[in-house]
Image: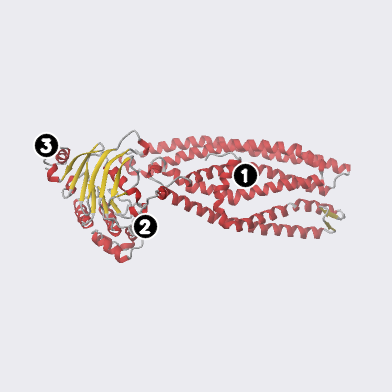
Amino acid sequence: MKSKPLNRTGVRQLLGIYRFVLPYKHHFLAGLICLFISSSVLLAFPELSGALIDTASGKRIKVLDLVEFRSISQIILTLFAILSLQTIFSFFRVYFFAKVSEPAMADIRQAMYQKLTALPMSFFDTRRTGELTSRITADVTLLQDTFSIVLAQFVREILTLLFGITILFVKTPKLTFFMLAIVPILALAALFFGRFIRKLSKQKQDKLAEANVIVEETLQAIGTVKSFTNENYEAQRYKNALESMVIFALKSANYRGLFISFIIFAMLGAITAVLWFGTVLVQEGSLQVGELVSFVLYTIFIAGSIGGLGNSYGQIQSAIGASERISELLEISDELDKNLENKSLIRRNGLKLSGNVVFKNIQFSYPTRKEVEVLKGVSFELKQGRKIALVGESGAGKSTIIQLLLRLYESDSGEIQVDRNNILNFDLKDYRANIGIVPQEVLLFGGTITENIRYGKPDATFEEIEAAARKANALKFIEQFPDKFETIVGERGVKLSGGQRQRIAIARAILKNPAILVLDEATSSLDAESEFLVQEALEKLMKNRSTIIIAHRLATVREADCIYVLEKGQITELGTHEELIRIPDGTYQNLIQLQMMD
């Protein structure tokens, strides 16, 4: 993930995402207070540790010129009280930040998921699924870590640095100036060295991600891999990717070892130098032994804060990059936004269309391939309760017509009307609720049969679901399963046969009861028995319903009221089956002959 500069714009971008925190601002404020108290209280620890040593020599010690201690036991009790306070407030700091970060990040994920489902198809044409999944998982997780852990560390390190140096300047100015001449140089060297290490680690992660892509692709197409006997080829491809990752990992490990050695040397060297100068001051009588111990402890605290700031800075940079990607997604105009922009929008509760469809001179090119005109002035009409069929070779534009009817895309010119209204003037959700589709490749969800059928009507009763399954010729095979309607169909419905999946899809469409029905190659790739059962179910579904049938197997379109033959985005022939087979050397007639349908 690319880091973004920590400038005003970047911080504004990060804070913009944290508008999701506003509903939980009281817990956030409580967490900040606990963080401030726990960090401030801990700074008294070095001072009291030094006072403990000086008290052992019989002196009365006044800590920070505020509290005078007369005995060791007083200091010990105070130290335990400070540690107890720090422990309590640290717990509540984590508790309050968790009360903010967990629900706030859940809100971000919900907003992103809702946005993704509302985005137009043109968006998904140019994005990879892995990239979108990464935004809703990895990017939000990075923000969550930044908010719940890194932010607290960053604030604590700033407080430690500012308060620690201030205390040292007040108590031991000579030793403080000496320390400031050494420690910052070493800390800056560690900072730049650390950035180099992070760069190598990122390269290693990138190589690992490339290897993971190979695994993902192989598992998704495992059937193809096996059918081409390319198991060894894929294993070698993965091995090569891992070897490349190992090279970067070893390089990163070597430099990380040098870095750790450097840090140990630098820190101990700085402390040794400070001890040397401090002992000189003790010999001169200008510094107490306890004050020297306190100073060394403060120096360790400050050095740790400087080193930690570099790491926190890098993580905040990454968080800014993640927030930018999330904001970019959330700000994209979606289908519903465009829908609301329409001033002449037809809104009707429970909109019920009749199913009269008219395509008027439709021209269309996909947004990602503007140079290729897919539809070239297509016009046709589907009257209420009638059946039409779209036939033609692959790429002729049949599926594109359905996508335009569903408003997955908008035509470049021309007009699509339903019940004499431009489809763009209907409320999008109300409009799509009137269209049902039974696709060629049915992708079921991984839940139960009940859940998959109910997808057509989320508030359907079990009696309605059972009736829909009966009409779809699905009830018999469903009741043969041990769990019947509660049978888990598996990911994408893999536990069901093709014919069973088709009948579940038909039951879903029956439950939806659409005015317009689309059958997209609904009986292809089925065996004879399954095709008969599916076709019988489809006949029930099509009865008195406006239906568009897409088919390569022309036997399924014989009974259509009108058949439209498409070639290269244009309708070249139209008529009934009997009319089209009489056209000499016609495209439909040639398709019939090719399929040996005589």
Task: Determine the residue positioned at 44% across, 52% down.
Answer: 114
* The residue positioned farthest toward the top in the image shown: 371
Q: Secondary structure at mark 2?
A: loop
Instruction: From the viewer's side, name the closer residue of 219 and 547.
Output: 547
Mark 1: which secondary structure?
A: helix
Measured Cα–Cα span from mark 3 to mark 2: 52 Å
> Mark 2 or mark 1: which comes first in sequence?
1
Classed neighbour count for the residue bearing mark 1: other residues with Cα under 10 Å, few (<14), some (14–19), many (≥20): many
In 3D space, how far apart are the residues under numbered discs 3 and 1 (Cα atoms)?
A: 77 Å
Q: Residues within 10 Å of mark 3 (few under 14, many from 20)?
A: few
Residue 510 visible, this angle: yes
Type of amino acid at the residue the image marks with label 1: Ser
From the top left corner, tell me how far across and down residue 45 is, in percent. Answer: 75, 53
Q: Is residue 7 left or right of residue 384?
A: right
Quarter occupied by residue 316: top right
Q: Residues within 10 Å of mark 2 (few under 14, many from 20)?
A: some
Relative vertical location of residue 449 with respect to residue 328 in this rendering, above or below = below
Contact (CB < 8 A) between labels 3 and 1? no
Give percent across and percent down for residue 315.
59, 43
Q: Which residue is mark 2?
A: 447
In the rendered image, which residue does mark 1 sit on?
312
- Whether residue 480 is visible to the viewer of this picture, yes or no, is no
Q: Earlier in the sequence, mark 3 or mark 2?
A: 2
Type of the residue with mark 2: Gly
Q: Which residue is situated farthest in the right direction here?
A: 285
Pointer 3 with pointer 2, Cβ within 8 A: no
Q: Is residue 485 left or right of residue 44?
A: left
Q: Earlier in the sequence, mark 3 or mark 1?
A: 1
Q: Residue at x 73, y 51 (%)?
A: 43
Task: Give the residue number, with chain letter if any, for mark 3.
Answer: 584
